[in-house]
Image (cartoon, rainbow, N blue to C red):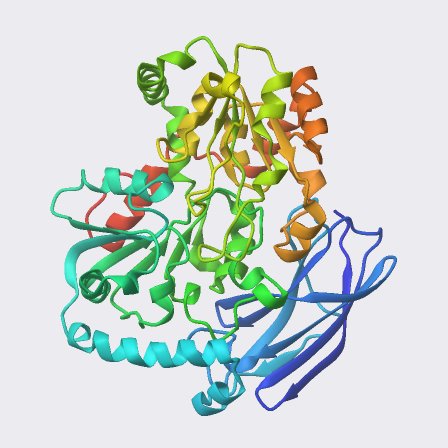
Amino acid sequence: MTKPTVTIERCQQIGHQLKLQVALTCPVPPVYPKLSVVFTCGERTRIIPMAFTDSDGTTLRAQKTVELAYVFYEPPVGQPMGITFLYTDGVHGYQPVEPDQPYQVTCPPRRALRHFIHSSKKEKLKQLAGACFSLLALPYRHRKVQPKQVTFLSNRSDRLSGNIKSVFLEMTKVPGVEITVLCHKGNLLHSLPVLRQFLRLYATSQVVFVDDYYHLLSYVKKKPEVQLVQLWHACGAFKTFGYSRQGEQALPQGSPNHRQYDYAIVSSQQVCPCYAEGFGIDLQKVLPLGSPRCDRFADDRYKAAFTKRFYAENPQLADKKIVLFAPTFRGGGQGNCYYPLEKFRPDDLLDALPENTVLATKMHPYLTERPTCQRAEHANRFIDLTDRYDVNDLLFVSSVLITDYSSVVYEASILNLPMLFYAFDLESYCKERDFYCDYASFVPGRIVRTMEELTHALQTEDYQQEKVVPFYTRNFDDTAGKATQNVVHFAKELLHIPTDHLPL
């Protein structure tokens, strides 16, 4: 990627706000450009995405209004903050770009009342809720943090899965560690006893692991002695999330949720800037220790055991070719997510595929509605596995993966699995959710836009599978089979437990 130049056309501090406008000049027209402003104060950094406003071929303009007091979670009041930039053309990784001349701004003190008055109605309600939760948490804030107490929090489902499950299972082998799991799906406010349990654990655990946006973290302030570690639930950086999102879906700069993480564990060095930006945390807090959920792909015994169990539980699938349909959801999140089921017609696919082919569906855990077959003759060739198995395990028994914008593509690439990308709503999804990179250049397989194209690609086995190996090489560091141990080793360091080996 040829290095561009950035000219700051406006850098004006008006009260607590910084009005920033820049011109980005690229040697060649970028494919899917992204520009972020980087604030630096000492060793601390904060990456904030900018929005492009217009383009003139190789010159693009971007702007951002920044609440300076909320650049850092703990504001360095009165201290200068330097300004640099990160850029990607959407195909290659991020690279630093220095502005045409050095700029510095000063961090002002926070004005809580002013921030409340000027915030949106939604944010006002959150701040009021935070005040109420602070009162509920008071009895627990005075309790001491218990040494070697570890809590695993997840509101993705009623049981642990993926990265957080892998770490949990390995942590149970560490002597002297007291482990608690608080696992629930949906709103914790519906259960007062569980809410109290959360408040107690969050106040007294030495290390707390989470694997997604955990909404109560927005309302309850973390003690400094508690180490909060985000494991996330996916590999890589595909769809934008958190503070990386623009427009109506963007998190306000003052929102505290993700920003309380002491550390975030990611799959590779390449995606560290994306997670630092998405979580609003220092780049140094993002650790490329690997994705624990991927360790199973280096474990032949695990693969063999799961395959044996799967076919024992589903003997009708023996000697069948399994086509796995595993899309992501549409919508803003857990509370308003959906999948347009009218766009996926299992009967049409099964009509066109050989009799020895089975269509298995694995929908996102947030979704309650599931695809179904309408014709009785397809009943023995269609199976919904959403509530039965981990999606990564299902890759072991699948011959083809059909997905769209799901991060499961990373795990599938480890197995060099053929993939098809059914992206019927690519333009609208990109507009609403956005990606960190150019979708067409990124995905390791053929993109299809209609059921007819999907059916034809399956019939002809036109997967563009040659894209898979280069995709894997770009997106994974050398952590195969070691990620869980790396994370547990790091956790032991946080718990002040002696370790007998060095992490990767």
Residue situated in front as seen by the camera: 273 or 422: 422
How far across and down, in percent of the image, does residue 179 sit?
18, 49
Which quarter of the figure is the C terminus placed in?
top left
Horizontal arrangement in the rendering, residue 239 relative to residue 233 (left or right): right
- Residue name at image x 22 percent, y 74 percent: 137
How far across and down, in percent of the image, does residue 282 sit?
47, 63
Q: Is residue 311 above or below residue 1?
A: above
- Quarter of the rendering containing residue 97: bottom right
How far across and down, in percent of the image, does residue 170 sit?
25, 38
Horizontal arrangement in the rendering, residue 309 relative to residue 372 (left or right): left
> In this rendering, does residue 480 appear at all?
no
- Quarter of the rendering containing residue 194: bottom left
- Residue name at image x 50 percent, y 24 percent: 415
Residue situated in front as seen by the camera: 205 or 83: 205
Q: In this view, does 500 lie above or below 445?
A: below
How many dots with numbers?
0
> In this rendering, does residue 98 appear at all?
yes
Horizontal arrangement in the rendering, residue 1 relative to residue 276 (left or right): right
Residue situated in front as seen by the camera: 95 or 338: 338
- Residue name at image x 38 percent, y 49 percent: 231
- Quarter of the rendering containing residue 481: top left
How far across and down, in percent of the image, does residue 31 sit?
77, 48
Taking the view exactly as shown, the residue that stands out farthest to the left is 176
